[in-house]
Image (cartoon, rainbow, N blue to C red):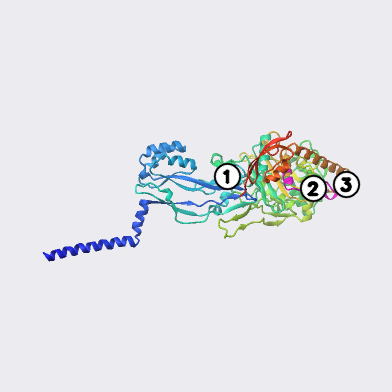
């Protein structure tokens, strides 16, 4: 009996020892299998992106930013009434209720996204329902503080936070940052404990992108383009402002703009950045490069004369005429061919060059190749391969039979403006990593090749100045008190479906720079299919004038009067013409000053003290809201002033 008790006691003792050892092993030593079971039962893990880097303009103003948002998810296994909850969520979030019901009743799944990037108000409302199985996780949401400003250039991101268009796509890797893992604990009943959520890994945010864009110039460009689209009932309009010396893009716009905060509501055709993706016949803006090429080959001088056939010339079995049927030019100098935009004169200069040399000139100025600007989808344009028949050679000489992009055109005019160097246009100034100890990557425009000597470029600038004088085609591009150099363009629209040209459809353009003698800005404007008028001189040149006038005054560039060194010598009546131009410049400057006194000035970006100094004599009462620099005014810049008015200045801190 005693031995049996000892055996039984020993057996129990051994059993307890085994249990204690097992318990100790479970408590002290890790077991991956049990840890996995624990994670599956009490935790949900998911991966989300860190904060996407901001996109700012050259002065640090935010153009694209990331703010906190709340993404709703569900655990179908613990949802009590999937049908009722699906109907309620569908109604509140404007989502298909049947689809939600189907997903919520799938008990095999422990995690499904319901809707990403909800507002704080929506989160609080859904939380107040007290529904089991719903939870939120905080993640970044992309917002665009200026709505449609610079829309086709910036692009936008999708629901997963990846860039889909524009700079958001081109620099997605730098902006996106990295993925981080979020742990969402659940209680014993399977309800998410989001307040206790934690990140398993600390990873850096995305890098910030600093652009060469100036948001104030961008606003002005878009405003003027919107005005011309509305006034002439055009389909679209395009504009670019580039620094003539650094080749930095200061503004770039395609109208109509797209509200990037609602980008999904717009068709792809409006989201496309036509400045780089669309190539079209440039019209007479191409004549500048034909003449520049002939000048470089020593085939012509500004005073070289050509007989322009009284406005009608036969090439092969086809006839070439002037754009305006009323033009019947006889003998014109090269300068006058450019000024009066003679097709026949340009064709004759093209014949002097010949097909091979003209083809080389076009390639030297960058036509037929990408400029390399930092945007996706850039087109090369269209350059017909050699050999060219005489009729095609003549057409290319005045801007038909060739297709160029607006970006190619502004880069080529930039080469004339800066002294003969073709440069890659620059849009991104720097990439700034989130961690300060990481190196900031800064960019500068690259020189591609020299296309003209400094003296040849200077001669071209003077001839292009003549193209904006009285009676010249670019007369409407003039600015009171300043020299303007540039060329109009009026091109028929190509019918890409049937071939040939669309009847009564044109692209009106103007390309040039200001001030002509020492260029600071290169500006290109193109208006697609204006209905009320179609000549570049009528439609695009006045827009150029308004934008250029704003730029030179904003930059504080002093007016310049006509002087002998700014003129091209021609034999007859030169002294009289100089005196008339100088008198006109003084009258224009005086008239402009009088007009300025009748309109409310542009105060964007000024400090409070600077703004008050500019409106001291025009304001009856000034109300100030906020602090920092002026971001909005009531009345708006350019509004008519009849006596003193009450003024509201809205200020924000740029930091």
Residue extent of the magenta highlight: 549-566
Q: Earlier in the sequence, mark 3 or mark 1?
A: 1
Circle 3: element type: loop
Residue 243: image location, x then y, percent: 70, 50
Lateral position of residue 312 relative to residue 84, left or right: right
- The residue at the point 13 percent across, 66 percent down is 3
Q: Are marks 2 and 1 in contact (CB under 8 Å)?
A: no
Residue 298: image location, x then y, percent: 80, 54
Q: Earlier in the sequence, mark 2 or mark 1?
A: 1
Task: Residue at the far left: name it.
Answer: 1
Q: CA distance from mark 3 to mark 1?
A: 58 Å
- The residue at the point 35 percent across, 54 percent down is 38
Q: Earlier in the sequence, mark 2 or mark 3?
A: 2
Residue 176: image location, x then y, percent: 53, 52
Q: CA distance from mark 2 to mark 3?
A: 15 Å
Residue 347: image location, x then y, percent: 76, 45
The dot on residue 571 is: 3
Question: 581 or 140: nearer the eye?
Answer: 140
Q: Are marks 2 and 3 in contact (CB under 8 Å)?
A: no
The residue where tag 1 is placed is 144
Query: Neighbour class for label 3 at 10 Å: few (<14), some, many (≥20)?
Result: few
Q: Nearer the viewer, mark 3 or mark 1?
A: 1
- The residue at the point 76 percent across, 37 percent down is 595
Q: Is residue 556 magenta?
A: yes
């Amino acid at each position: 009996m005693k031995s049996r008790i000892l055996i039984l006691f020993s057996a129990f003792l051994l059993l307890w020892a085994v249990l204690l050892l097992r318990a100790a092993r479970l408590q002290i030593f890790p077991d991956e299998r049990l840890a996995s079971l624990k994670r599956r039962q009490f935790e949900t893990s998911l991966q989300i992106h860190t904060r996407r880097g901001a996109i700012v303009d050259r002065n640090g103003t935010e153009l694209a930013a990331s703010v906190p948002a709340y993404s709703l998810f569900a655990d179908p296994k613990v949802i009590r009434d999937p049908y009722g909850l699906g109907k309620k969520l569908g109604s509140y979030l404007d989502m298909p209720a049947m689809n939600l019901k189907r997903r919520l009743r799938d008990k095999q799944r422990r995690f499904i996204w319901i809707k990403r990037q909800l507002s704080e108000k929506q989160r609080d409302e859904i939380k107040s329902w007290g529904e089991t199985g719903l939870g939120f996780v905080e993640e970044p949401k992309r917002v665009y503080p200026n709505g449609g400003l610079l829309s086709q250039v910036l692009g936008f991101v999708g629901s997963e936070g990846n860039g889909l268009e524009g700079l958001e796509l081109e620099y997605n890797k730098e902006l996106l940052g990295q993925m981080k893992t979020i742990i969402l604990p659940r209680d014993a009943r399977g309800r998410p404990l989001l307040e206790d959520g934690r990140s398993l890994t600390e990873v850096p945010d995305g890098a910030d992108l600093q652009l060469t864009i100036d948001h104030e110039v961008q606003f002005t460009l878009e405003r003027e383009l919107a005005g011309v689209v509305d006034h002439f009932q055009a389909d679209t309009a395009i504009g670019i402002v580039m620094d003539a010396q650094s080749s930095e893009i200061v503004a770039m716009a395609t109208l109509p703009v797209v509200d990037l905060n609602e980008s999904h509501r717009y068709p792809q055709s409006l989201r496309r950045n036509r400045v780089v993706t669309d190539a079209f016949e440039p019209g007479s803006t191409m004549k500048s490069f034909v003449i520049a090429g002939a000048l470089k080959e020593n085939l012509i001088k500004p005073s070289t004369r050509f007989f322009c056939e009284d406005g009608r010339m036969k090439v092969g079995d086809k006839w070439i005429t002037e754009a305006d049927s009323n033009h019947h030019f006889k003998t014109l100098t090269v300068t006058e061919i450019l000024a009066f935009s003679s097709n026949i004169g340009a064709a004759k200069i093209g014949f002097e060059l010949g097909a091979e040399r003209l083809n080389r000139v076009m390639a030297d100025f960058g036509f037929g190749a990408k400029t390399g600007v930092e945007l996706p989808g850039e087109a090369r344009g269209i350059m017909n391969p050699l050999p060219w028949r005489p009729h095609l050679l003549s057409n290319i000489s005045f801007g038909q039979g060739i297709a160029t992009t607006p970006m190619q055109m502004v880069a080529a005019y930039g080469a004339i403006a800066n002294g003969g160097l073709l440069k890659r246009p620059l849009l991104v100034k720097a990439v700034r990593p989130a961690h300060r100890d990481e190196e900031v990557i800064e960019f500068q425009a690259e020189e591609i090749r020299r296309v003209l000597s400094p003296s040849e470029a200077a001669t071209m600038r003077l001839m292009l100045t003549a193209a904006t004088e009285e009676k010249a085609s670019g007369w409407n591009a003039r600015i009171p008190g300043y020299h303007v150099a540039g060329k109009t363009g009026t091109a028929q629209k190509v019918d890409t479906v049937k071939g040939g040209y669309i009847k009564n459809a044109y692209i009106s353009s103007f390309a040039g720079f200001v001030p002509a003698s020492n260029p600071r800005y290169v500006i290109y404007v193109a208006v697609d299919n204006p209905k009320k008028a179609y000549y570049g001189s009528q439609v695009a040149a006045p827009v150029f004038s308004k934008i250029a006038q704003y730029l030179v005054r904003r930059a504080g560039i002093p007016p310049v009067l006509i002087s002998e060194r700014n003129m091209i010598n021609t034999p007859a009546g030169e002294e009289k013409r100089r005196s008339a131009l100088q008198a006109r410049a003084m009258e224009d400057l005086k008239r402009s000053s009088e007009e300025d006194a009748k309109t409310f000035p542009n105060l964007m970006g000024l400090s409070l003290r600077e703004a008050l100094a500019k409106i001291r004599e025009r304001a009856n009462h000034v109300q100030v809201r906020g602090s920092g620099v002026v971001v909005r005014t009531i009345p708006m810049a350019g509004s008519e002033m009849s006596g003193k008015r009450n003024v509201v200045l809205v200020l924000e801190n740029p930091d």
